Amino acid sequence: MKPLAPDISGFVDSEGVRIHYEVSGNASATILLLPTWTIVHKRMWKAQVPYLSRHFRVVSYDGPGNGLSDRPAEGAAYHHDVQVRHALAVLDATGTDSAVLIGLSQGAAWALQLAAQHRDRTLGAIFIAASLAITEGHPARAATLRPADLPPSRVPALECDPPQHWGKYDPAYWRNHYEDFLWFFFGMCFPEPHSTKQIEDCIRWGLDTTPEVLVAEADAARPTKEAIEDWCRTVASPSLAIHGDHDLISPISRGRRLAELTGGDLIVLEGAGHLPIARDPVKLNLLIRDFALSVSR
């Protein structure tokens, strides 16, 4: 897919880190597409920006560690409070008073914290496949096998890896077998059949950063369950949780609990994995459009 050229692009200095942002569309209401895990950059939203910018002003940016933004090597640069301040810096740099926040996976935590602590900047919030420590994770992710005992990923051969390969979710393994980890991880992100193109896109974006960046990011502080629950109860704007019932990264129980605590709605995507914005973009685009229209009128 050929990228849509943004109407505006630039950099903002936030916490000593240069953050690259883009703005597409010129409608009165703004959607802020937050970054997700550092393993990908804002091209992850490539199926959303062209459509949504017909109806809204769409702001997206590369979080620290990937894309056109700086790649700090210290874990403190990826702290969840710092990530929220990056988002605020982008809002300020783009002249955005308030926006509909959309957070995917780990980015859902930053969207939630932003919505809770900066109500005046938030029209509403959508949390997609939220990776929040608000319920227990998948038992399979507590792998006990050493990464060195695991064979290479079978995803390049159009096969699936067994759950035991979660042992590769290990900084030491990333340093020495980074591309193999990417194949495993994104294979888990897309359990849906016929996802080869989506997996290959993510591999390419993952190779735009380095294992050293992921290792640094892994040292960053994560919010506690108590903090997350407090943010949920503090959110005053409308919210929507969207979660696939075949998400192998973050269980659907997290989406259910998030909706329960925020008082928002929950939409369950049958058969969907962790990245429905790439696997079923038309459905996601329509859900985002309808919600954003409802809160920005």
Image: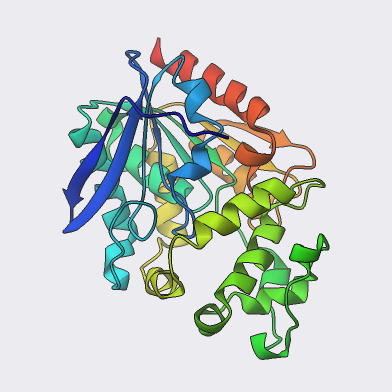
Q: Residue at x 65, y 26 (%)?
A: 282
Q: Quadrant of the C terminus?
A: top left
Q: Nearer the viewer, residue 26 or 68?
A: 68
Q: Residue at x 29, y 45 (%)?
A: 20
State the scheme by which the image is colored: rainbow
Give how far across and how far down residue 260 sits, in percent.
58, 39
Can residue 254 be seen in the rendering of this structure? Answer: yes
Q: Residue at x 47, y 46 (%)?
A: 108
Left or right: residue 276 compared with residue 57: right
Q: Determine the image quadrant of residue 161.
A: bottom right
Q: Residue at x 64, y 31 (%)?
A: 281
Residue placed furthest toward the front: 2
Q: Determine the image quadrant of residue 128.
A: top right
Can residue 133 be seen in the rendering of this structure? Answer: no
Q: Nearer the viewer, residue 83 or 94?
A: 94
Left or right: residue 144 compared with residue 121: right
